[in-house]
Image (cartoon, rainbow, N blue to C red):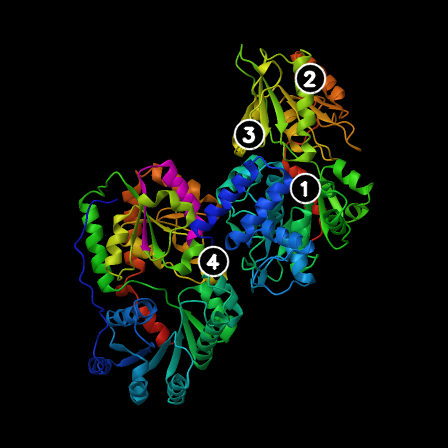
Amino acid sequence: MPTDTKATSLIKRSARVVYRAVPLGVEQKMRLKGWMFRNFRPAFERTRAYQAWLTYEQLHGREVETGNREANVTTLLSARFPYLRPLNVFLVTRAERRLTIVTDSINLGSLFGGVGTAVALGAAIARHLGIALRIVTRTEKPNQSNIPAILDAFGIDWPGNIEFAFAGVTDPFHQIDVGPEEMFLTTSWWTTWSVRAAVGATPITYLLQEDERMFYPMGEEHLRCSEVLADPDIRFVVNSRLLFDHLGTSGAENVNRHGVYFEPAFPRETYYPEPGRSGAKRNFFFYARPNHERNLFYRGLEALNGALEAGILHPDEWDFHFVGGRMPEFHLAHGVRPRVVHNLPWQEYASLVRRIDLGLSLMYTPHPSYPPLDLAASGAVVVTNRFGNKSSLAAYSPNIITTDVSERAIIDGLRQAVDLVHTPERRTANFEQSGLNRDWNKAFETILTERPR
Amino acid sequence: MFLASTPEVIYRDPWNIPFEQRISRLQTGDFRVAYLYERPDTSTFRYRVYNMIQALAHSGERVSATFFSEAELDDVSRALPMLDALVVCRWRYSAEINRVITKARFCGKKVFFDIDDLVFDTDHVHLVLHTLDQSLKQPQVYDHWFAYCGRLGGTMRLCDEVIVTNDFLAAHATAFSGKRVHVIPNFMNDEQLAVSDAVFEAKRASDFARSEAFHIGYFSGTPTHRRDFRIASAAIAQAMRAHPQVRLRLVGFMEPDPALNEFTDRIETFPLQDFLNLQRLIGAVELNVVPLQDNTFTNCKSELKYFEAAAVGTVTVASPTHAFRQVLTPERGYLANEQDWETVLNSLVASRHTYADMACRAREHARDAYSSRNQGHRILAVLRS
């Protein structure tokens, strides 16, 4: 399989940087994109962005010199949904059964809660069945050395070899071998779709960790995601009772009928309070992902800024840590400049979380999301938002304060949270009354016994 | 890098023996074996023909063995009456080889098919292509490989019994052919051992003296091993990042993986070597890395990368394929799961105080188990079975 030359890689990387940084409007950026794609086609023609642009141009009646024959429906669909193309597999005779986890990436930027849970669940299933384990990634080549730390943090023992393979979404010659009894653990509706298109639904267990329909406006992706959730031949494993119940009451009853749920765990070896030195400032954690709409970065920022302005949080008392994604440099009220961290290795993230006193972590979906639970499991007080049947997370920990999602309500929640931080006896008592699961092996027990096959 | 060095060996193929000499040598023994190989080379021919003949000569029995190539098949046919056994080694089916095998079998001579790779069953062709990173875009690639494997399988089916290198491969040969399958592992010949002994003794005499640089060696540097090398390339890059003294020695014409682009000033590349001078290059490095994909094809491969390194006192880290799981006990070397290469390499670079002991144990094991001086009786037992 031919790989990019150095020149091609450089062009692609430079183009991405320029496109993101150049201060132009959307239409102008589209024209700029078109110019790049027309003049440097060989460097881009295998990318998802190029295929999507090509389809867009053709749909708008603009001719693009591609050297290819006229598109038919199959090629149009393939260009529109490159990540839904069937996983490129070939059958091998293979004596040993194997479970293959299919996920976008296991590299640093992707390796938070959800992916780690998938790896841990996959290892637990494979160990329970006494079969081999493989991880296949679709958008980035796997960094194998990330995995031992994940399994260690989850307390899942896997002493044997794990195979790794990269089956890139856009390259039709990225193949993987499959045995006649291969099992798959998929991690998103699109990986499920892609695997189902290759080997059918029967070998698939789909780990569902969010209502993925909510990633999209009402349209093509939303529709296809809904279709996957409605497939009666797929086995579903759902992260949390909250999400499981939500799906059952929101048009995805099939998931309830053909699925089981588990509650995530937060092992004490990783999640415990690590109080600061005497006299040091307290630590505030904001789960800050500007490019992930459901994390309500801007609403959180409004509320945090409001809390600073109202004197609920004092810059003299608090250090502010914005954790999650890249963002431009800026300051909050009173000139507060947060420390921005992203792409933290797992152990460093856990180490930071252990030192946090108060966290603000918003999730505009039914799943509790991991950061509030990570924080509460490590002794912090947390403010998060209600959504649908996610009305309170106190059952996980009384130190989790759940509010409405208005700016005012979140600021009030921060006020309550600060009071709780200032009442260490109550904070500690709440921590000790936590209902959080602490053992992933126990968390997965039901899955291993109830999940068919 | 180990400081002890030995002079370069002037290499000549040791099997350039004229036909007349080979045919008359064949007549000296009471039990006479002819090995057939299409064209002598330094890989399969060396291990499965030349080394076997040498081992039989060391057996102390009155056995004589030699080899014949494609151009000499008519002579083989004429010589059949004097033979006791015929070993057809990795020979692609043809009318000519069929004729020779047919005559041999009709003359009551047992014919063995010797094969050292899972390349006789077309069921595995796609896996082989994938493992060897062959282009799947060209129809001629399929044509070549299906023909190649089909032809080898065809010759196997003509023979009486099969000889392979390990029991994992044996199970597949049995399932494919339904014939009796014997295992004779690969081993080293006298010439390789002599050079290896000189390299090892120089290292031992210098007390394994080293320079500041720590060398990791990868000695399978052909493009067909790109996927194998990729298993460890990120880990090697990380070791080079963490330890400025680490160097990578690559033998072969494979392009280093992009993961190593930032370290080109610390990568030494050598062209493919003859099998004697290769031992000198292996002997100079601290760590011989053998990353391998884990599948049916790779599990059929032998452990020769271990014993070649062990013979010159170099420690090996290998993926836990079938053969390496058997041989790399904790006293002799290291196994690394795919997810653990980074941890293993980092710990080995940082800690080398037990090196000499392990190197000596591995060397002793390699000389005992993989020397042509110790294999003759085993081979004879198979050929006489």
Give the amino acid type for the residue marked by disc 3 in the picture.
Tyr
Q: Nearer the viewer, mark 1 or mark 4?
A: 4
Mark 4 neighbour density, 10 Å: few (under 14) some (14–19) many (20 or more): few
Same chain for the residues under marks 3 and 2 in the image: yes
Q: Looking at the image, do the residues carrying marks 1 and 3 touch, with CB atoms under 8 Å apart?
A: no
Give the amino acid type for the residue marked by disc 2 in the picture.
Gly
| Relative depth, front residue between A389 and A289 | A289
Numbered circles on residues, count: 4
In the rendered structure, does residue B230 fall within the stretch colored magenta?
A: yes
- Badge 3 is on which residue? A349
- Badge 4 is on which residue? A2
Q: What whole-number distance in Å separates the C-alpha atoms at marks 1 and 3?
A: 27 Å
Q: What whole-number distance in Å separates the C-alpha atoms at marks 1 and 2?
A: 44 Å
Percent across and percent down for residue A183 are: 63, 55
Label at residue A445: 1
Q: Residue at x 23, y 41 (%)?
A: B210
Q: Quadrant of residue B40?
A: bottom left
Q: Looking at the image, do the residues carrying marks 3 and 2 touch, with CB atoms under 8 Å apart?
A: no
Q: Nearer the viewer, mark 1 or mark 3?
A: 3
- N-terminal of the pair, mark 1 or mark 4, is 4
Label at residue A306: 2
Q: Is residue B26 left or right of residue A96?
A: left
Q: What whole-number distance in Å separates the C-alpha atoms at marks 1 and 4?
A: 44 Å
